[in-house]
Image: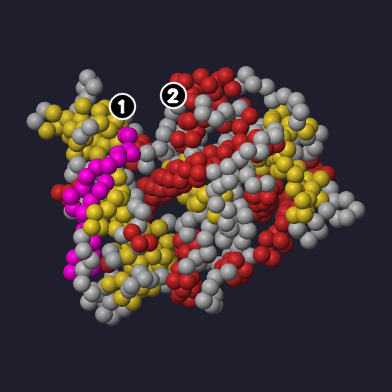
Amino acid sequence: MSPPAPSRTLTGRIDVHPRGFGFFVAQPPPSGEVLSAFIPPPELASFLADDVVSATVSQGADGRWAASGLTLLQRVRQEVFGEVVMRKGAPQLRIDRAVASSDWPLESSGAELRHGDTVVARVAEGKVVLLRKLEPGADHSIERVIARHGLRQGFAPEVLEEARKVQAVPHALGARRDLRALPTVTVDAPSTRDIDDAISVLPAGEDGALRLLVSIADVAEFVSADTALDQAARERATSVYLAGHVLPMLPEELSAHWLSLVPGEERLCLTVELRIDAEGRVTAADVYESLIRSWARLNYDEVADFLDRGVVSEPMAPVREALPWFRAAAARLAVARAGRGGIEMAREEARFTFDAETGQVSGLENVPPTSAHKMIERFMVAANEAIAEWMLARGLPALYRIQDEPEPQRVMDLSAFAQHSGFAAGFGGRLTPLGLGAFDRQISGCTAEPALRSVLRRSLGTARYTVVPSGHFGLGAKWYLHFTSPIRRYADLAVHRTLKQYLRGRRDFAHQDPAVEQLAHHINARARAASRAEQDRHRVLEARLMASHVGQRYLARITRVKPFGLIVQLDDMLVEGVVPVDALEGGPFQPDERETSLVGRGRTFTIGMPLQVKVVSTDELLGRIEFAPTA
């Protein structure tokens, strides 16, 4: 065994575990390694999750790292959620245990506080200051998730005032191209309020090429850079969808009304026009400012009915003649996508239903993607790719969306998972976009598909924004960025601003502008927080629902292996939970080096293996469902 590494002082971020201990995660990782060091409870007492600290890290004889001597460098968290506890007549706040391991003194700001009150508080020097008490008996899980992940809800008065002024700016034609006479539609879920993309298709000419027009709400025309409205949007960076609750990036009077591409209303847009030949190649792209009027608001189900069965709904009547060309454009792009590899991004989702009267979660249903979802995905991906190539050709700094090729070890792990799930991956030493596409075809429609896709997404890794152009592996795209959702994503709004400046004559752009790269880092961080919050909310509601299913049995599949047990996903409900190592016979168990198998004296559990389980218990606060094997 090699001797322990010497102690060293590093800078990093704190993660807090609900059981009272924590971890110091070095940033940036030294020498390219991911270094995570254990923080014992006494060292953690005065810190919060996400605090940036310096720490002395040392390696024990067992090879594990520990952190001590923590010094606060930066506190990014502004608000915390918790429960009031009274000690000797003075209030303290038992902060959400995923954020702090100890109770903090609470300044009441003159309000009457009682033991057990649930509150949101502002973080101050060594204490927290009451912001608001929450109504007793209400569902506080949303507030907990919002505070836990540093999300923003509501807008400051000056932001709302600017939003009101924006609504006085007319949607006027001016020097824009007039597309109001083109059959134009939007396709969204019935519940969607922030509609930012519309589509038109011009029939094929004598050369066989058709033209697809993707028109996107021109948010940049109304939201100027560095205003209070813009700063609020930039800070949020994305709208957050918390199952039954939305935190919009822009105030609702803009996102759901004045900027939304509602039917029958004139709207300013940025349009990308793609020439698609008979073999699905995009042979030309043009970008311009436009004025559109949506002829119809369609939903995915009715569009799928037309694509699959030729059924024309009443809202489709005004655009009936254009519908076959939508189908043709989607089919052409699908052929081209298949020829280069990658995966379809539209996938089956678990969607909660809510009681209309009480607002309480009432069920969980699996929603598979329809042909309409796939059509719109192809159109939006094609538009985003075309804009990326258009901007790159002109040397414009942009927030490119990239995803690296997965490392060989990740590919081996995915191949092993597929094998234990009954599939022959056969990737070889390297996974290519075409190999990925072939695997995507192989697993589509099978029982194990949701679990396989869960592991596949982890194997591919997270896509990110950067000013340095590169490929997007999962899409098999040479260049890619986000252009199609500026109401919901700040990255798209930033791209729009650069495009509009170029279209209006600006040419003095900085090559790979450092300010754009700084913006990319901020958006990546906010996107991660939003994703974690959405996952947290999902797990809380899953635990709440499954509390009434204790004792019921399900077929599941192992998707991850951890020292504390197995993470499994149910085949039928897309619900994930843990089988603790203590519930497994044949132990003691230890994970192998890659955490692909849990190895015991008499039995081994490997990712991909099917398992029959029953629900043992649920913990809504932790968003945890515990299973036990039944056979």
Which residue is at 57% across, 60% downward? 474
Task: Please state the horizontal and vertical placement of residue 475, each as a whole percent of the image.
Answer: 60, 59
- Which quarter of the picture shows residue 179? top right
Whole-percent x, y for residue 202 in the image: 81, 45
Residue lying farthest to the right in this orientation:
206
Circle 2 SS class: loop
Q: How many marks?
A: 2
Q: Say if 112 sits above or below 126 in the image.
A: above
Q: CA distance from mark 1 to mark 2?
A: 16 Å
From the image, state whether disc 1 or disc 2 is nearer to you: 2
Residue at x 30%, y 45% (from the top left corner) = 52
Q: Quadrant of the C terminus?
A: bottom left
- Tell me if mark 1 has few (under 14), some (14-19) or many (20+) residues whose alpha carbon lies within 10 angstroms of its own: some
Residue visible at 57% across and 31% down in the picture:
255
178 to the left or right of 368:
right
Residue placed under numbered mark 2 in the picture: 156
Residues rendered magenta in the picture:
53-79
Q: Is residue 408 left or right of residue 25?
A: right
Rendered image: mark on residue 132: 1
Residue in the foreground of this view, choosing between 534 and 480 = 480
